[in-house]
Structure formats: C-alpha cells, structure tokens
Image: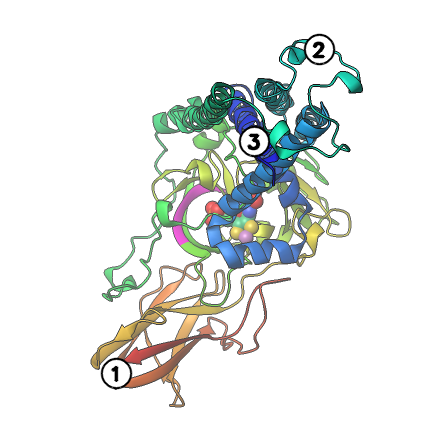
Amino acid sequence: MSVRARRAGAAGIASALLGAGAGELAAALAAPTSSPFAVVGGVLVDAAPAWAKDTAIAWFGTSDKTALLVGIGIVLLVVAALAGIAEARWRRAGVVAFAALGLIVGILSLTRSDAGLLAWLPSVLAGVIAAIALRSLLGLVRTPYPSAGRFPRMSVSERADPPASLPVSEGRADAVDGPTRRRFLTWTVGTAAVGVALAIAGTLARAGSTAVTAAREAIRLPKPATPAPAIPASASLDVAGISPLITPAADFYRIDTALVVPTVDPASWRLRIHGLVAHEVTLTWDELLALPLVESAATLSCVSNEVGGDLVGNAVWLGYPIRELLKRAVPQADADMVLSTSVDGFTAGTPLQALTDERAALLAVGMNGAPLPLEHGFPVRMVVPGLYGYVSATKWVTELEVTRFDRARAYWTDRGWSERGPIKLQSRIDVPRPGRDVPAGDSVIAGVAWQPATGIAGVEVQVDDGDWQRAELATAISDDTWVQWRLPWPARAGQHSIRCRAIGGDGTTQTDAVAPPAPDGASGWHTISVRVS
Ligand SMILES: Nc1nc2c(c(=O)[nH]1)N[C@H]1C(S)=C(S)[C@@H](COP(=O)(O)O)O[C@H]1N2
Ligand SMILES: [Mo]
C-alpha cells in the first residue's frame, strides 16, 4: 500500500471516529435510544433469525451486545479507511460515502419503535462531521500544486491529485514536505482523539444520574398486602459454590434486544389493556402502587439457556396479579393470548390461561425488595412462573393486547421460536465446577433443579457408570422456584463423569433426549467431567 493510501485510510478512520464520537454525544444529550451504534445494532438484532441469536449467546453469553457493538465498530473502521482511500483517489467519493452513511442510519433511526422526533439527528450529524473532517484532513496533504486546494471547484485536469488512472510515481504522490506531514499527523491523531473523547463524554452523560435513575432512587415501594412466606433456613444448603437460593439482582442474567437500556419515567408510565375485551383498562404508576401488591418468588429462565447454562435466576418479585387486571377488562370467550408490548417495541405472546389461572403471574414493580433495576424492566415488567422469558417476561411493559394465537405473533415467534414456551424440567450441577480438579476424599456434588409452576420432587445423580443416587433436596420455597440439592461424594482419584436429572412435581423424570435451545428450549442431562487427585 502506498504511503498516500495509508495516509488517506488513516484520515478516513480519524474522521469516522470524530463523527461517531459526536453522534454518541448528540444521542446521549438529545435522543438516548438513537445512538448510531444502537440503531445499526438494533436493526441487525431485529433482522437476525433464531439461530443467529442463539449462536451469539452461545459464543458471547450475556456479552452478546458488547460483541455486536464491537463488530459494528470494526466494520465501521474498515469502511472508513476505504472511504478515506476513495476520497484521495476520486474527490468527494469518501465525503459522499460518509454523508450517505449518516443519512441512511438517520433514516433507519426513524423506523425504530422507540424513535423520538430527533432520532435522525445523531447519525446525520455524525455523517456530516465525518465528511467535513475527511475533506479537511486530506486537504492538508493535497499539495503537489501548492495553491490548488484553495479552489473549491476544479476540473479533472486541474485536480491537485493526479488521476488514479495515470501511473503515479510513489515519490511524487507522497511528496509532501516534512512540516506538512507533521501537520497532517498532528491533525489526524487529534481528530481521532477528540472523537474518542466525545464518545466517552457521551457514555458518561448517558450512564450518569439520569432523571429516571433519580426517580428510581426516590421510590419507596409499598409493603406487600400478601407477603411471600418466610423462607425457611432449610431452603439453603450449606455448600460452597452452590447457586444462592435468591439471585442478587446484580448477578441476575440479562437478556433483551435493547442495545440502550430504555429509560421510562414512572410518572409518565401507562399500561393499556385492550383488544378482545369488554372494557379497556389503563393504569398509571400511582394507581398500580395503590393496589394490594403480592410478593412471590419465581425462577426465570431464558429459552436460550443451554443445559448447564447460567441464563436462569431466582428472585422475589413484588407486583400485582395480572389475573386481577384481566378480570377488570373481561376478555372475550374466544381470546387465548395476551400480546404484551414494551416501550422499545419488543413483544411477547403469553397464553391467556397462564395469566388467569391461580399462578402468581405478576405485573412486577419490585425485585428482591427494591424497585426493578433499569436493565430488568424498570418501572414495570411481567413475570409469569413456568414460562420462558421470551413468551412472558416483557420488561418496560406498556401494553397488553388480549388477542388470539391465530391472529398475532410476537417478537421471537416471528423469528422461528415456538409459540408456546413452557420452561422445561431442568437441573444443573454447580459443584464441583466442570473442569476443576477435586481433592480426593469426602466431597460433595450439588446444584439446583427447577420447573417453575410444577415444582421439583427429587434429583438423582450418577457418577460414571454407577447407580443413580437420590440427592438430598433442600426445602422448596414454592413450586415456582428452583430447589437446591446435594449428594455426599467419596471422590476417588481419577477422571470422573457426573450427571444429574430432576424429577418434576408431577412425577416426570427429566428427559435425556438432547435438544438445542431453538425452537423451544434445550433438554438433556447436565454432565460434567472432573479430575480427582
Ligand atoms: N422489552 C423486552 N423484554 C424482554 C426481552 C426483550 O428483549 N425486551 N427479552 C425477554 C427474554 S428472551 C428473557 S429471557 C427475559 C430476561 O429477563 P431478565 O433480563 O430480567 O433476566 O426478558 C424478556 N423480556
Ligand atoms: Mo430469553
């Protein structure tokens, strides 16, 4: 690559960094969900088929969002370098490319369901700034004819740069003198640095105490009218390394399609219940908090959770039974689904039955004694024991449409996942950790088992080809939560394979049939390999 092309590529990258940084800051200040990266990421996420979501989660786990944004960043830098090189060859090609990119992403921004009036601004601004920066940086080194750069309109023959089709001697094309080169370098590095600084400023402005964070901190949740029964000490087994019975909110897995966490002000939050109902119902935050709230523990799992995976957690939720709200709305007899919608456009289709039977399906405002964290759906989300999150656990929920499965489809069912998503009977070995060395002697095998809404009757463990042994089961909080289990294990030196299977509250034994997460949840026995020495 010629010196000239390298220089032009660097100018392209620096210009893109400046534009992107300015776009991020503008988004943070004027249109938080319309950051150019979030928009492109959101479009990609929405376009992704079922297998892509699963591969992303399998490769990157809950860092899938970061991985996506890094990927977009890398592609942007490559495109920017090419735009720079193009600009040096064919004047305006790179400038037009940057401006067009900004415009396209600006238009995409307006198509997002959470787009505000200024959604287009960050991307368009980013494109314009990158274009101007590129033009200016390359202007610094466009010097073979010293005065040429000052004329805005030039015919091809007058262009400062030799046309690309002519054989160009490297020496001549790159013949900028030392001071010019230094000036170019300084400005290019400076431009890139300012871009990075703007991006950091944007991130800080966003993460900093936004109005909604402050509103959340000011909330004092009411005492539940129906508190969760006290958790007996016997519900937790004393085993180092076992999953805690209640997952702290900070450790609770997070899965959603939102690249920027939605910020919903409780004061303006509304829930609207409509569709196949006798009466439309709307509910404000204050009205919701004034209702007799119920506290109830439930284990939530993602359909993408692999056997043995960690996309599952158990929390104590505080909320109002959705059943009671539906009673007010009076669903029509032919309705069989409730399509819930989030502020960011995500939808889930929940069987009406699961929201009207006796289970604690909640419109939740609290998690483990505090208002919902922003990432987990503040101010209001759904939690339905027994169903995977993608069909039931809508975060930042604002709408419940009573409808029918043959009429409406939801976000993930539209992408090939099953219409119904009951959580499969599962069990996991937490101790020993797979792949870890275990000292020989008295040891313990322990973990958790769950089938929310059905409960757990037992867990069995098999070491190598031995008999299945019944593990000790901790006291269950309820049928809706996972249950800890353990089995003493006299570990003898050598390599061992350990597997577990649960027996559900209905007497069914967890199937050994191996299934991947798509389309309706993974199955099979969690099996680990450990070395005892
Ligand atoms: N608004 C919104 N709600 C959502 C999702 C989403 O993408 N957007 N994902 C669902 C899925 S797939 C799961 S598994 C749960 C995860 O909830 P958590 O992040 O609180 O663990 O949220 C559900 N609710
Ligand atoms: Mo999920």
Residue at mark 2: C-beta within 8 A of ligand 1: no
Residue matched to label 3: 7
Q: Nearer the viewer, residue 325 or 212?
A: 212
Q: How many marks?
A: 3
Q: Is residue 468 above or below residue 445?
A: below
Left or right: 82, with 381 as reference point: right
Disc marking residue 491:
1
Residue matched to label 2: 152
Q: How is the image coloured?
A: rainbow
In the rendered structure, which disc, 3 or 1, sits on the residue that comes first in sequence? 3
In the rendered structure, which disc, 2 or 3, sits on the residue that comes first in sequence? 3
Outermost bottom residue: 466
Q: Nearer the viewer, residue 83 or 436?
A: 83
Residue 244, percent from left and from top: 31, 58
Residue at mark 1: C-beta within 8 A of ligand 1: no
Magenta stretch contains residue 318: yes
Instruction: Tell me the CA gap for discs 3 and 1.
Output: 63 Å
Q: Are marks 2 and 3 in contact (CB under 8 Å)?
A: no
The chief SS type of the magenta part is strand
- How many neighbours does mark 3 have within 10 angstroms: few (below 14), some (14-19), or many (20 or more)? many
Residue range in magenta is 314-320
Instruction: Tell me the CA gap for discs 2 and 3.
Output: 22 Å
Instruction: Tell me the CA gap for discs 1 and 2.
Output: 81 Å
For the C terminus, which image quadrant?
A: bottom left
